[in-house]
Amino acid sequence: MSVNAKTNIVALGAEPESAEILPLKPAAVASSVVATSPFGAKLRAILRSMMQKIVPGILGAMVLIALWQIAALSSKGFPTPLKTWEAAKVIFADPFYIAGPNDMGIGWNVLASLKRVAIGFGLAALIGIPTGFLIGRFRFVANMLNPIISLLRPVSPLAWLPIGLLLFQRAEPASAWTIFICSIWPMILNTAEGVIRIPQDYLNVARVLKLSEFTVMRKILFPAVLPYILTGARLSIGIAWLVIVAAEMLTGGVGIGFWIWNEWNNLNVENIIIAILLIGVVGMLLELSLMAIARRFSYDNR
């Protein structure tokens, strides 16, 4: 082939077009990486979960405040949310002042109530958990104690307060007694239910190995029943915190219940509402702490 022929063939072809390469913008690259990386997907999931929890909570609080405002406007003497907020700033500016034996800040009153709850709740756990083990382990003990529990459990907790005053002759142990008697039943029943639900194979192995009853309790029953025990404790602490307020209203002294009653006598309705909200917050924290402990020892998290 001649040189001219080669030249003609090249001339007949189309002109090659040049392609311009445009670099991606840094923001586009970053968003692309975040959108496709596992970290970006995890971050979006966390944000979505937070929004699903926070937004409904904020809306619920707004509805509560709106209803509160409507009630304040339609009722004479009922404080508005703003007025209550101003009173709360005064109360929590010095919550631990002491001006006398019965004139203390709200912080001391909450601590006094928590102390009574701790005493009554601790005694209930000390007696209720072993009793639940015995009921779940031995049919004879269950047949002996179940009728007594069925008889006493429906009794209102405050009905036990006069018995405590008669037995102890003082308000402080009478309040702890009331907490004890009302919080012991969930611990007994939940512990007994957990023991009953233990697979029989575990006990058969213990029988074959000729383990002592104490070893069976410590090595087999207690680890398996621990989630049930913690559930009973969570129910008991809620009941105990609920009852102590009413008991302190009747017995007097230092405590959040007495503080509410004293504020009612002084017609400080704003302070009563503040105490109600504080009682709810403390009770919620107590229950959340026990729920966290229960999740820690749950078999699902092991």
Image (cartoon, rainbow, N blue to C red):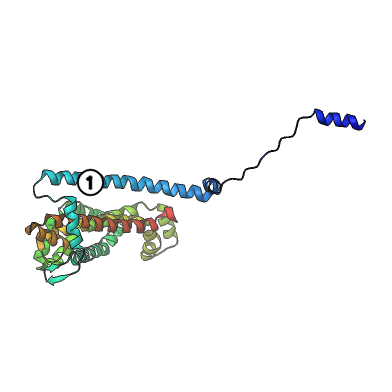
Judged left or right of residue 34, residue 222 is left
**9 or 71, which is in the foreground?**
9
Judged left or right of residue 129, residue 163 is left
Identify the amino acid type marked 1. Answer: Leu
Judged left or right of residue 286, residue 35 is right
Quadrant into which the N terminus falls = top right
| Picture coordinates of residue 85, whole percent (x, y) | 20, 55
Of helix, strand and loop, which one carries label 1? helix
Question: Which residue is outermost to the left?
Answer: 265
Disc 1: CA contacts within 10 A as few (<14), some (14-19) or many (>=20):
few
- Image height of 157 relative to 8, above or below: below
Quadrant into which the C terminus falls = bottom left
**145 or 286, which is in the foreground?**
286
Q: Is residue 188 visible?
A: no
Residue for badge 1 = 64
| Picture coordinates of residue 210, whole percent (x, y) | 42, 63
- Residue shown at 22%/46% (left/top)? 64
- Residue shown at 14%/47% (left/top)? 72
| Picture coordinates of residue 193, whole percent (x, y) | 31, 52
Q: State which quadrant residue 83 falls in.
A: bottom left
- Residue shown at 17%/46% (left/top)? 69
| Picture coordinates of residue 180, whole percent (x, y) | 20, 61
Instruction: Tally the numbered discs.
Output: 1
